[in-house]
Amino acid sequence: MLDIMSMMNKVKEAQAKIKETQAQLVHLRAEGEVGAGIVKVIVNGDRKVLDIEIDPSLINEKDKDMMKDLIVGATNKALENIDVKIKEKMSAATAGMMPNIPGMDFGNMV
């Protein structure tokens, strides 16, 4: 019975740590770039786009479709990069707190 109580306390600790870490994710930043850096997108841990940088050489009506494709690509890359940072942050927040339970990945709790 004592082991179950101890485990429940650890679960509560982990939940509190996860909630605290989730609140801090807004401060994470990740960048995605495509086309050798001619389009860059910056996102935060809330998976919101914060900024888009476009090389002035791209701003031409005939390149409009290419520019759209590059922006989509850079945005998706930035979101992939922030997902990695989120997982690292969540894993670090719960490191050593929870027993290794097969099928339970507390690093993905976002």
Image: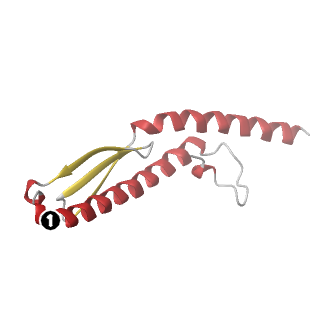
Secondary structure under badge 1?
helix
Extreme-front residue of the structure: 61
Along the line of sight, the residue nearer the viewer: 1 or 19: 19
In the image: residue 61, left or right of residue 20:
left
Residue 74 lies left or right of residue 96; in this view the side is left
Residue 20 drawn at (x, y percent): 56, 32
Name the foreground residue: 101 vs 46.
46
Residue at position x 12%, y 61% in the image: 61
Q: Residue flagged by tag 1: what amino acid is it?
A: Asp
The location of residue 19, given as percent across then percent down, is 59, 35
Residue 24: where, in percent of width, then height? 47, 34
Judged left or right of residue 44, residue 37 is: left
At x 53%, y 37%, the residue is 21
Q: Is residue 53 placed above or below 7 in the rendered structure?
A: below
Q: Is residue 92 above or below residue 74?
A: above
The image shows residue 90, relative to residue 23, as above or below, that is below
**Image quadrant where residue 40 sits:** bottom left
The residue at the point 31 percent across, 63 percent down is: 73
Q: Determine crowd level at label 1: few under 14, some 14-19, many 20+ residues with C-alpha closer than 10 A.
A: few
Q: Which residue is mark 1?
A: 63
Q: Quarter of the image containing the N terminus? A: top right
- The count of marks equals 1
**Which quadrant of the structure image shows residue 68?**
bottom left
